[in-house]
Amino acid sequence: MQNRSLSFWLFLTPVILGLGIVVVIPFFYGLFYSFTDWNGITATAFIGFENYINLFQESEFVDSIWFTVKFALITVILLNVMGLGLALLVTRNIKSSSLLRTVFFMPNLIGGLILGFIWQFIFISVFGDIAGITGIEGFDGWLSTTNTGFWGLVILTAWQMAGYIMIIYIAYLENIPKELIEAAKIDGASSFQRFKNITFPLVAPAFTVSMFLTLSMAFKIYDQNLSLTNGGPFNSTQMVAMEIVRTAFSDNDMAYAQAKAVIFFLIVAVIALTQVYYNKKREVEM
């Protein structure tokens, strides 16, 4: 660090300042306010851990955490399986691979709110018409129950993010030495054996990156949740981010919402860092 040139620090200074002003300083301010009765303008009393004690006794917040954890678990697995599968498909020697890459990635360019409204129309109107024509009751009443609302969010997120995760896996797949694949073919290895013993270990770093991104994204999702289900029915599909926003801006309880945000940050940080540590360890073992 001492040998860095002056130009290095000049270029780095705006980034450090931006990070400090936008992230670090607000974080510590928020941490302080979570121990007060802050109303968004002033804090008149220091109340200690009262907000933290109350939030663990609030069933709605605890339910939103469990709902978010379940959503994150399913979404992380599904997105990585789909992303790797799509990457394997478009890296094959087929003429339409470039077109397929574009098509699979395009949903990621659409805003979350717009996607939510598009899929809301599909789940309610299109599925309702299908139910009316075919008589299949499973298509009727989507988003009207907790279970269908949950899977609606999973489907929307998978459709939006699979192409983005695909790009990460493509970058690692295309860096695999072709000589290894050719040697394995000559030795008589099947497609599954080549994938298991060559492809999978060499793309292990991609799993670390992709799982971290999908995990953090799944926990922080808000706009899709807002536009697709708005937390309904009866807040049963309300994720943690939405619950915190409603506490702050609907209930006007800023300090309490900040305490929830701190706990939420700790949960996401612990899970994400544990995942990165475990995956890095697996990379070494492979």
Image (cartoon, rainbow, N blue to C red):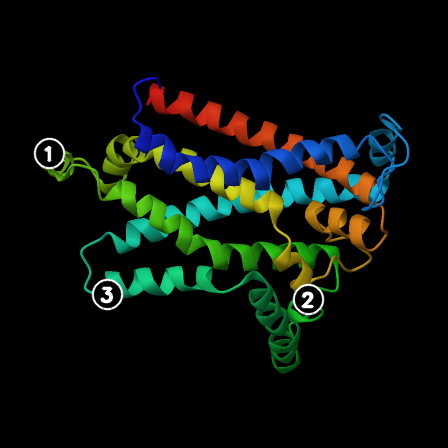
Q: Are marks 2 and 3 in contact (CB under 8 Å)?
A: no
Going by the numbered disc 3, the residue's amino acid type is Ser
Choose between 253 and 209: the one closer to the eye: 253
User: Judging from the image, what secondary structure is the residue with disc 1 in?
Assistant: helix
Tell me what residue is drawn at x 58 percent, y 54 percent: 154
| Location of residue 5 in the rendering, given as x and y in whole percent from the top left corner | 29, 26
Tell me what residue is drawn at x 85 percent, y 46 percent: 253
Mark nearer the N terminus (1 vs 2): 2
Mark nearer the N terminus (3 vs 1): 3
Q: Are marks 3 and 1 in contact (CB under 8 Å)?
A: no
Going by the numbered disc 1, the residue's amino acid type is Ala
The span from disc 2 to disc 3 (Cα, nearest Å) is: 35 Å
> What residue would you read off at disc 1?
183
The span from disc 1 to disc 2 (Cα, nearest Å) is: 51 Å
Viewed as shown, does residue 72 lie left or right of 81?
A: right
Tell me what residue is drawn at x 13 percent, y 38 percent: 185
| Location of residue 226 in the rendering, given as x and y in whole percent from the top left corner | 68, 60
> What residue would you read off at disc 3?
96
User: Judging from the image, what secondary structure is the residue with disc 2 in?
Assistant: loop
| Residue 115 location, quadrant | bottom right
| Location of residue 259 in the rendering, given as x and y in whole percent from the top left corner | 77, 35
Compared to residue 251, the image places residue 270 above or below, namely above
